Amino acid sequence: MTDEARQQRTKVQQIADDLKAAIERGEDGFRPGERLPGENALASQYGVASLTARRALKLLSTEGLVESKKGAGARVLSVQPIRRRGIPRLASEQWGSGKSIWAADDHRAPDVDQISVQENTTPPEHIRNVLALASGEQACVRSRRYVMEGRPVMLAASYLPQELVAGSPIVQADTGPGGIYARLSDLGHAPTRFREEIRVRLPTSEEAARLSIPTDRAVIKLARTAFDAAGRAVEVNEMTLDTAAYVLDYEFDA
Amino acid sequence: MTDEARQQRTKVQQIADDLKAAIERGEDGFRPGERLPGENALASQYGVASLTARRALKLLSTEGLVESKKGAGARVLSVQPIRRRGIPRLASEQWGSGKSIWAADDHRAPDVDQISVQENTTPPEHIRNVLALASGEQACVRSRRYVMEGRPVMLAASYLPQELVAGSPIVQADTGPGGIYARLSDLGHAPTRFREEIRVRLPTSEEAARLSIPTDRAVIKLARTAFDAAGRAVEVNEMTLDTAAYVLDYEFDA
């Protein structure tokens, strides 16, 4: 990088840092729904080229803090992130009584707008390993997309051993009250323990397209494994979350 | 964006997707420590300009999947991410017996290479709220940087109510066996419940510099609040994690 490029980059970052701090503090003019200063105003305020100011605004929209509309400038995003409670929402009293596992999420539940169920598929290697599938054993995959107020927020793909779920309501689009955990319970494999593993990376082109996010905004990969009382992994749900849409929350006793 | 720019960007993304898939599958030539094809090789393989290939390689290094050295090309990162177990590591038997809370992390413990303790500070608004500090009440802040094999992986800033910890070993750099949770216990405020909140965003310039990561690689913000038996928030630890260095792991019963 040339010195000039480095200097310009530092300026971009400084303007972005200032704007983000103002949004975080909820300063006047930086509250949800309010319009940020335009690139010309920022350029003259910081004494930089308008391209530099535009790049700073672009950083904020990549991150999902502002919404940019052609000609209308950038507005601070007015949608609050979804609070996903990791532990209470999985407590057996939740799904045992037929409630959605989303019901614990601060009264806002994303809706499923796309669902597909595929039986007899060969899952990726890392899923096969966790499910301890022998060579030739197959899986049923339930793929869903979740939206909040029309905006895609999460993709989820649940993998279950094919022989375990064949012929059960789990292979239907609608699995009935309590969802797949209640149905696994009907089959004698009620989940008794969960593991959630969280990584962050950039999305694939396909993930970015399905979530309607820029390819340079990171996603959370959240893999949840459900174990039955015998310690068998009966489901792996691989979720892909828009990082701008979620706060993950885990509460537990010492 | 012009059509040409969009097309180039799609090509960049496609090459990056292919390389990432090969790394994920651990294909020959794409295992940890192995050298990726150079930009010229990729350019001729995909029939694109070498700038396009270079941008694809840049995406991988932004994400932290490869290490690029001047003249030596890009190698697949050989360091495995650190597994941070959220729940067992906080179990009271861990810190109660004087063990580090890091001991549960797959036998690899990051070291602290920077530590500073500041008393009588005014914490940011969101920390004040959680700690329920009245106006004028202050906090003690313990700031640390963690490194793994010489590489910075996490920043942490623990905020504790000043009046609670004044004069205790908590205001010393070395808090003694069991760390601050054992000392809070000595003070009659043993943590009995924890809450961990996870968000992902781009780093500030300062965070990126302290973690030695590019400013366009996302960080995990992990805020852990410790509550005593009376339900009082006695500590908020705001952590900033290099997303390339960590897998978070939560295990719990249904």
Image: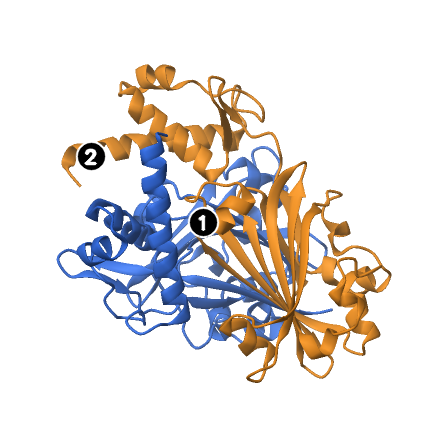
Chain colours: A blue, B orange
Residue type, mark 2 in image: Ala
Q: Quadrant of residue B33?
A: top right
Q: Indicate the position of residue A218 as horizontal and vertical percent values.
A: 42, 48
Q: Residues within 10 Å of mark 2 (few under 14, many from 20)?
A: few
Please state if A174 lies on the left or on the right of B75 as rendered: left
Q: Residue at coordinates 42% horizontally, 56% vertically from top-left?
A: A243
Front disc: 2 or 1: 1
Disc 1: which residue: B205
Q: Residue at coordinates 49% horizontally, 50% vertically from top-left?
A: B206
Q: Indicate the position of residue A10 as horizontal and vertical percent values.
A: 37, 44
Q: Quadrant of the C terminus of chain B?
A: bottom right
Q: Residues within 10 Å of mark 1 (few under 14, many from 20)?
A: some
Q: Quadrant of the N terminus of chain B?
A: top left
Q: Is residue A219 above or below residue A122?
A: below
Q: Is residue B63 above or below residue B241?
A: above
Residue type, mark 1 in image: Ser
In this view, which residue lies farthest toward the front? A47
Real-space Cα separation, disc 2 to disc 1, in angstroms: 28 Å
Q: Of residues A157 and A221, which is closer to you in this image?
A: A221
Q: Residue at coordinates 35% horizontally, 15% vertically from top-left?
A: B40
- The kind of secondary structure element at disc 2 is helix
Mark 2 touching mark 1, by CB under 8 A? Answer: no
Disc 2: which residue: B5
In this view, which residue lies farthest toward the left? A71
Q: Of residues A213 and A23, which is closer to you in this image?
A: A23
Q: Which mark is residue A126?
A: none
Please state if A159 lies on the left or on the right of B193 as rendered: left
